[in-house]
């Protein structure tokens, strides 16, 4: 990993700023993780096969975008001015990374839904009480009973801290 990190230094140095570079890399790799987590919490029909395919397809799209961006970022010979204008790689390279993250998220969600419906549903007994869709009345009553005035007060305190930080740092 250290060797890979050292070989990657010229790529990072060629970026506009370290912050922008890190945000774009996160934007390329995080969407499939988000989709799997979000669907895992809220949708009881997804299955392990759908999750696996979502991660593979999402990471492949993110890796593809990183591979398209890298020669331009490093200004390698022949890529000083980017790809030929109007070409497929030029279009991919010129989509803002935030928009490309949305594309990866949507494709990952479509893969999740498609593969999960194309393969057998998980057994209810194995996913009982794991998602919002499979919570039981017993689960809900245990959750309600676990909250006291201390937890409510701590939650209000945290929200006030977040609001205070937002007001202070908004500029």
Image (tube, rainbow, N blue to C red):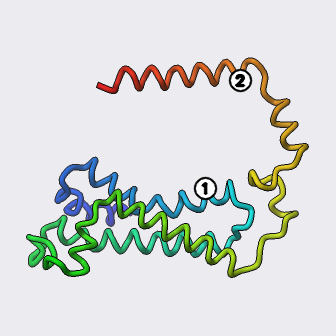
Q: Which residue is mark 2?
A: 151
Say above or below: 108 vs 87. above
> Which residue appears at 9% of the width and 70% of the height?
81
In the image, 54 versus 1, the foreground residue is 54
- Residue 103 in picture, x, y percent from top left: 42, 66
- Residue 40 in picture, x, y percent from top left: 67, 59
CA gap, disc 2 and disc 1:
25 Å
Say above or below: 19 vs 125. above
In the displayed image of the protein, which residue is found farthest to the right?
138
Q: Which residue is mark 1?
A: 38
Q: Secondary structure at mark 2?
A: helix
- Residue 146 in picture, x, y percent from top left: 81, 30
> In this image, 125 relative to 41: left or right?
right
> In this image, 133 relative to 3: left or right?
right
Q: Quadrant of residue 149?
A: top right
> Which residue appears at 62% of the width and 76% of the height?
114
């Amino acid at each position: 990993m250290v060797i890979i990190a050292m070989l990657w230094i010229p790529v990072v140095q060629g970026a506009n700023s370290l912050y922008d570079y890190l945000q774009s890399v996160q934007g390329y790799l995080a969407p499939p993780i988000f989709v799997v987590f979000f669907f895992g919490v809220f949708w009881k029909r997804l299955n392990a096969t759908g999750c696996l395919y979502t991660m593979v397809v999402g990471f492949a799209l993110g890796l593809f975008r990183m591979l398209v961006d890298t020669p331009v970022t490093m200004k390698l010979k022949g890529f000083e001015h980017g790809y030929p204008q109007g070409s497929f790689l030029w279009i991919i390279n010129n989509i803002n990374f935030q928009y490309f993250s949305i594309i990866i998220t949507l494709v990952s969600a479509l893969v999740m839904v498609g593969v999960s419906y194309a393969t057998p549903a998980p057994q209810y007994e194995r996913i009982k009480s794991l998602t919002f869709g499979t919570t039981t009345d017993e689960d809900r009553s245990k959750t309600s009973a676990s909250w006291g005035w201390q937890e409510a007060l701590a939650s209000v305190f945290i929200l006030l801290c977040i609001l205070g930080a937002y007001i202070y740092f908004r500029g």
